[in-house]
Image: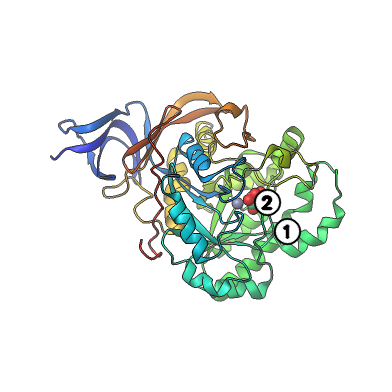
Amino acid sequence: MAGFDLILRGGACVLPWGTETTDLGVREGRIAAMGDLRTAAAEQEIDCRGLHVLPGLIDAHVHLRDPGDPAVETLETGTRAAVLGGLAAVFDMPNTTPAITDRARLDWKRDYLAGRAFCDVGLYVGASKKNIAELAALELQPNVCAVKVFAGSSTGDLLVEDDASLEAVMRSGRRRICYHSEDEYRLQARKPLFRSGMPHRNHMEWRDVECAALGTRRLMAIARATSRPAHILHVSTAEELDYLRDFRDVATVEVLVNHLTQTDEAYDRLGGYAVMNPPIRDARHREAAWAAVRDGTVDVVGSDHAPHSRAAKERPWPETAAGLTGVQTIVPVMLDHVAAGRLSLGRLVDLMCAGPARVYGVSGKGRLAAGYDADFTVVDLKRQRSIEESWIASPCGWTPFAGHRCTGWPVMTIIRGQVAMREDEVLGPPRGAPVRFAEARGA
Ligand code: DOR
Ligand code: ZN
C-alpha cells in the first residue's frame, strides 16, 4: 500500500451508513482509504481513539460582512471563527456593503478569498429588482452556492417583495433559490404600531407568525406554478413547518440553531442581543422545530451568523440591529443537543453536512467516502465546556450563547487533509478554497 499524507487512527467515524470505528487514509487532500491501516505509514498520524470523526461540517448560512465593517467582522476573522468552532466550510451571504449582485463583484470576492479564508467558502449571489435577467447566468458562475432572495427586508438593501418580480426571479435560471421569507407588506403595515423605546419582546409581535407564514405561502404558490426549487431559510414557525410538508416536491427547509435553542425569555435576558430576523419566538415554535427535525422536514441547520457592533445591538428597539453571531458556536450547541438526546449524532451530520451538500449540490463534500475531500470535524462527545465571550474570534466580540454549558466540543478541524484547528489553536496560514458546486461552471 502506498503511503499516505495523513492517517486518522481509530476514531468512531460517522459514515453515511452508520458509525464505524476505522482508520482513514488521506492522500492529496482527499480520502484515499478507509479500513484497517495498521500496516500503512503516513507523514502525519493523528490518534483519534475515544473521539468521533464527522465529515467536515458546513454552515450554509453566514454573513461575513466583507466588504463592510472590519471592526465587526471580515472574511478572515469569520472563517477563523468557523474553524475554531469545528466548521470546514461556510456559505457566505451577499448582503455586504456593497452587495454581491453582479459578475464583477462575484469575481472580486472569489479572488479575495485566496490567502484570507481559513475554511472553504461558497458564495451566494443576491437578487435585486435590477439584476433579475442576469440571475440565470450568475447562478452558474463557479463557486456560487445559490441565489439569495430577501422577499422581506432585513439588514442591507436587497429586496424583491412583489409576486410579479418574484415570479420573474423564479423564471430566470434553474437551480434551487434561497429565500428570506417574511411578507414585506405586512412588515411595513405593522411597523407604525410599534414605537421607539418599546421592550425588545415587541420584535416578535411586529414580525409576527403571520408575516413569516404569509411570506412562505406566497413563495410556495409561485414556486409550484413555475416548478422552481426553493430553499426556505430560517423557517421559524410551527405553521410554516406544517405547511411546507405539502410542498416537498419544490421545497427544502432550513432551521436555525437559535430557533432550536432559544425562546422568547431571551428578550428579557439578552435585550438587543436576542433580536434577529425572523424573530426568536415562544416555546410552541421551538417544539415544532424539533418535531420537524425528528420527522425529516428539516434538511439543513444553519447559524445565520450575523455580527453587528455592540453599539448597534444596544440601540433602543426598534432601532436595534437584527442578527446574532453563531458561526463559532453552532457545533458546540448542536453537540449539546445530541448529549441531551434531542437528536442523534448521525442526524446532526445529516443536517450540517449531507443536507447542505444535497440541497446546494456541492461537489466532493458531504460524506466520509473514498474520493471525497478529506474534511473532518473531530469531536469529543464527553468534553464539557462553557461558551465564553473571550473565545469568540469575531471582532464584534459577543455571543448570545455566553455562559451556555455544552457537553460535546469540536477538538479538531481538518480541511482537505490539513489540520486547520486543534484544541483551540488555528494552525497554518489561511488555506481555504472556494467550494465547488455540480451545477456551477468550472465545478
Ligand atoms: O437577523 C438577521 N440578520 N436576519 C437577516 O435576514 C439578515 C441578518 C443580517 O445580515 O444582519
Ligand atoms: Zn441570514
Residue contact at pointers 1 and 2, CB within 8 angstroms: yes
Residue pictured at 52% horizontal, 72% vertical: 134
Camera sees residue 348: yes
Relative side of 343 to 151, left or right: left
- Image quarter in which the C terminus is found: bottom left
- The quarter of the image holding the N terminus is top left
Residue labelled with disc 1: 211
Query: Where on the picture, by quarter, is residue 51?
Result: top left
- From the viewer's perspective, is 323 left or right of 36? right
Q: Nearer the viewer, residue 161 or 123?
A: 123
Q: Secondary structure at mark 2?
A: loop
**Does the closest atom of ligand 1 sit within 8 Å of the Cβ of label 2?**
yes
Pointer 1 or 2: first along the chain = 1
Q: How is the image coloured?
A: rainbow
Question: CA separation, marks 1 and 2?
Answer: 9 Å
The relative height of residue 416 versus residue 166 in the rendered view (above or below) is: above
Establish whether ligand 1 lies closer than 8 Å to the Cβ of label 1.
no
Q: Which residue is mark 2?
A: 278
Relative image position of residue 158 (x, y in whole percent): 64, 61
The x and y percentages for residue 14 are 36, 40
- The disc labelled 2 sits on which kind of residue? Pro
Residue at 53% in and 66% down: 102
Q: Is residue 175 above or below residue 340?
A: below
- Amino acid on which disc 1 is placed: Cys
